[in-house]
Amino acid sequence: MKNIWELLEKKESRQKILIGKAASKLFNDKGYLQTTTKDIADSAKLSKGGLFHYFASKNDVLYFILKNYMDLALENFEHELTEVKDAPSKIRFIISRHINFYLANSSEGKTLFQDAHLLPTKYFKVIAEKETKYYKIVAGVLADFINGRVEKSELTILAFELLGMCNWIFSWYNPKGSITPGKLSEFIYDIFYEGVSGYKERRTVDNKT
């Protein structure tokens, strides 16, 4: 899977892509608050004036990174799911796609998880709306798997449990280790599927009694 900067080559200027790549690595390595605009300009081999030609502030750089990350995470997501035959296969697909996309864009993904809340409100709302759209797609697949017999609050828990299992690999997973991304995806799928299947069976019994 390509990273977001490769996919943006035909949409954005070379300089904006260089700034985004440099900044996402710095935010990942140093933290957003500890990274200065001078750090970003130096890493992108620009003057500060050159940086400000493309972005008015460090907030704008962070927003540029996160917006493109979420836009590309959402791109064709619903259409791709329509081509998967059944709900269990869709769950497996979601996990594999989510992990592979994150691993191809790990600096940007970590920046989303760790620093999105530092955005100004107007920017944060846009990112939150995109995250909500992604969540709703996942929740819709889970609702189909459970045949809709689930309260909204419980569906929310299931969806965030799945996303949490995928997202928190950023804090511990080493893709160069013995566990391949494919094996990790299957491991997460097996645990989640078995757990939800047990939950589904209990719901069915409860509804009959």
Image (cartoon, helix red, strand yellow):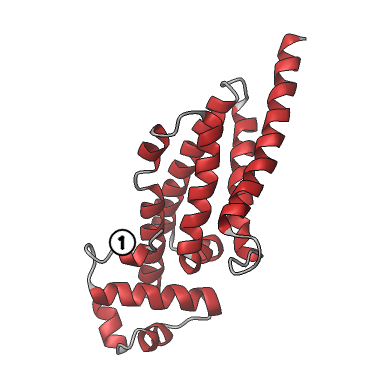
Residue at figure coordinates x 59%, y 69% from the top left? 176
Tell me where residue 91 appears, x and y as whole percent: 54, 38
Residue 46 versus residue 27 in the image, above or below = below
Q: Is residue 208 left or right of residue 186?
A: right
Residue at figure coordinates x 39%, y 56% from the top left? 122
Please tell me how crowded label 1 is: few (under 14), some (14-19), or many (20+) other residues with Cα within 10 Å: few
The answer to whether one can see residue 93 in this image is yes
Residue at figure coordinates x 39%, y 38% from the top left? 78
Where on the picture, by quarter, is residue 194? Answer: top right
Tell me where residue 60 appears, x and y as whole percent: 35, 69
Residue situated in front as seen by the camera: 197 or 40: 197
Q: Is residue 130 left or right of residue 94?
A: left
Residue at figure coordinates x 58%, y 66% from the top left? 175
Amino acid type of disc 1? Answer: Leu
Extreme-right residue of the structure:
209
Residue situated in front as seen by the camera: 90 or 64: 90
Tell me where residue 160 appears, x and y as whole percent: 60, 43
Quadrant location of the N terminus?
bottom left
Residue 94 versus residue 146 in the image, above or below = below
Q: Secondary structure at mark 1?
A: helix
Quadrant location of the C terminus?
top right
The answer to whether one can see residue 56 in this image is no
Q: Is residue 193 left or right of residue 56?
A: right
Tell me where residue 102 appears, x and y as whole percent: 50, 59
Residue 145 versus residue 65 in the image, above or below = above
Residue situated in front as seen by the camera: 1 or 78: 1
Give the residue at mark 1.
7
